[in-house]
Image: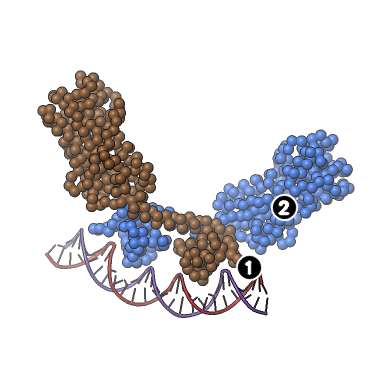
Chain colours: A blue, B brown, C red, D purple
Amino acid sequence: MELRLLQALVAVADELHFGRAARRLGIAQPPLSQRIRRLENELDVKLFERNRQGVSLTTAGAELAEQARRVIAGAEHVEKLAHNIRSGGAGTLRVGAVGSAFYQALPTLLTPARDRLPELRLHIREMETPQLITALLSAELDVALLRPPAGRGLRSRTVWREPLVLALPEGHPLAGEAEVHARQLGGEPLVLFPRDSGPGYWDRVETLLRAADIALEPVAEADHVTTMLGLVALGVGLSIVPASARVLRLTGVRYVPLQPRTELPLAAVVNPETLTPAVDRFLTTLPRKPVLPADPG
Amino acid sequence: MELRLLQALVAVADELHFGRAARRLGIAQPPLSQRIRRLENELDVKLFERNRQGVSLTTAGAELAEQARRVIAGAEHVEKLAHNIRSGGAGTLRVGAVGSAFYQALPTLLTPARDRLPELRLHIREMETPQLITALLSAELDVALLRPPAGRGLRSRTVWREPLVLALPEGHPLAGEAEVHARQLGGEPLVLFPRDSGPGYWDRVETLLRAADIALEPVAEADHVTTMLGLVALGVGLSIVPASARVLRLTGVRYVPLQPRTELPLAAVVNPETLTPAVDRFLTTLPRKPVLPADPG
DNA sequence: CACCCGTGATATCGGCCGCATATCACGAAA
DNA sequence: TTTCGTGATATGCGGCCGATATCACGGGTG
């Protein structure tokens, strides 16, 4: 089955005149007659009635022309789709993000992309920071959302920021405070995110605690915010988490602002070596200045 | 855009191996490489990553292969559709029928066709008997349902039969009778269907009335059963209609069986000159013996 | 009634495209 | 280092499809 034959069918069906149809197809009339004949032979169906003064469709021809239109439209859609993929409006964008971005940042940040690039499919995967960077470098991901720094030749832009807050069990003496200073954490058992899994987070927590002369000796480490908060609820220890974790309203866990205020940014990171138009257009949908979400109360 | 190029895309996307894909397409490997290259040039999109030991799809390639599959399936559907049209299972069948067939016969008779030939589109038109015959002869219709005889080289089969009944206004002296003999109609004003529009009906009514020595001098003629019954309801006269008209429960109209019992058949008529497989298969869905429907009560 | 114009079909030839054969370049595995 | 297998490249040939020229036919027109 050749597409040109179907185009011939549609052209003649539209014009009901071999000469005009041929002109529309940019060919001479005899080859058009041949195309129709070939199609009729191939399908073993008479498509047109060529009688006294005029061409008319047989019912079979009308039926098949209808379907042929759909096929041709599909083929044209391939070309349009290719153009859109080339210009970044369509296709698939593989986005990776750290777990803590899933609670509030991702839904917020991706909404404009879904609105403005509706044909762009977004594949979202959760990964830890080192894996994100590896995947970016090997072109398995197009964009990563992680806690900076990303480093090593990757291009990065901060799109979100939020303070670190203290998560502590309901019955804890500090749970009633309006805010807690890092100095007050001396001697408290801490549940933290492992350095290897989240260096950006770790560095900021380290800076915060060192300034208050607190040693970084977590009593437990967990590689998901939910797990950390679960341990907090069990009374294993206190934890320091990004403020957006508060949308997880776990029973038995209280959140208290932490002094000195320390912000944990989230950056959109791309590999300049593998930039595609789709990535570019996606990046334009992200905020130019980092967003500081309102407190969930 | 050529279909062969899309087939090449799909084959390589499936096999991820140029040699196997080429074998599947029945061509050698070099021309397949050329097809892919041509497609990549035409769409200006890189479809495959040919690297160390192996071929892999780019995201664009995966996206486009998906759409290409749809286009190819559509093209194959054209061939299947042509085959079905050829064998009569698909396509459009143009059916014409007299008005009085629409109340009960048509819905009943067409149901098996809809069930057994779901891909066959049925175009139903109401026409009067002479127009039906003309349309059959000029191949504007495939099948006609009319009150025989059809005559003149057309092939006809009775598929439905029903008695003629008397329709009369509610207050009429005969309205209460269990049945009325034609002889009782002497002097009654009659509303009949015009001879030119329905010769089959007319002939049977004529036979019925002549046997009872009643003159055929209708006080009014109407070319739709509904109009005739409307005139009956207004008291213009009595009418003789096929029993299936009783499903039209017009206020002010009573129906009474008529003696001597006279049946009005309905025949499926086709033009042997323009027989198509679709017509044949449609005819097989009609009853072999004429159906006599149960009284609607 | 003869002519002529317009229709689509047919005949013939030429160009070109796309296939097959042969070969190459490269990388991995032995 | 050799060898195998991959996909890419080079080249020549065959076939197909298109343009040109022409035909057959029918209807309108002087």
Front one among A261 and B100: B100
Check disc 2 and give the amino acid type: Glu
Say whether residue B81 is left or right of residue B276: right
Res B132 label = none
Q: Residues within 10 Å of mark 2 (few under 14, many from 20)?
A: some
Q: Quadrant of residue A176?
A: top right
- Residue A205 visible to an observer of this rendering: yes
Q: Which residue is mark 2?
A: A128
Position in image of residue B62 (x %, y %): 56, 58
**Label 1 secondary element:** loop
Q: Quadrant of residue B82?
A: bottom left
Q: Chain of mark 1?
A: B
**Label 2 secondary element:** loop
Q: Which residue is mark 1?
A: B52
- The quadrant of the image that shows the N terminus of chain A is bottom left
Position in image of residue A158 (x %, y %): 71, 52
| Gap between marks 2 and 1 measured at Cα | 28 Å
Front one among A170 and B280: B280
Q: Quadrant of residue A252?
A: top right
Q: Residue at x 88, y 43 (%)?
A: A187
Front one among A218 and A286: A218
Q: Chain of mark 2?
A: A
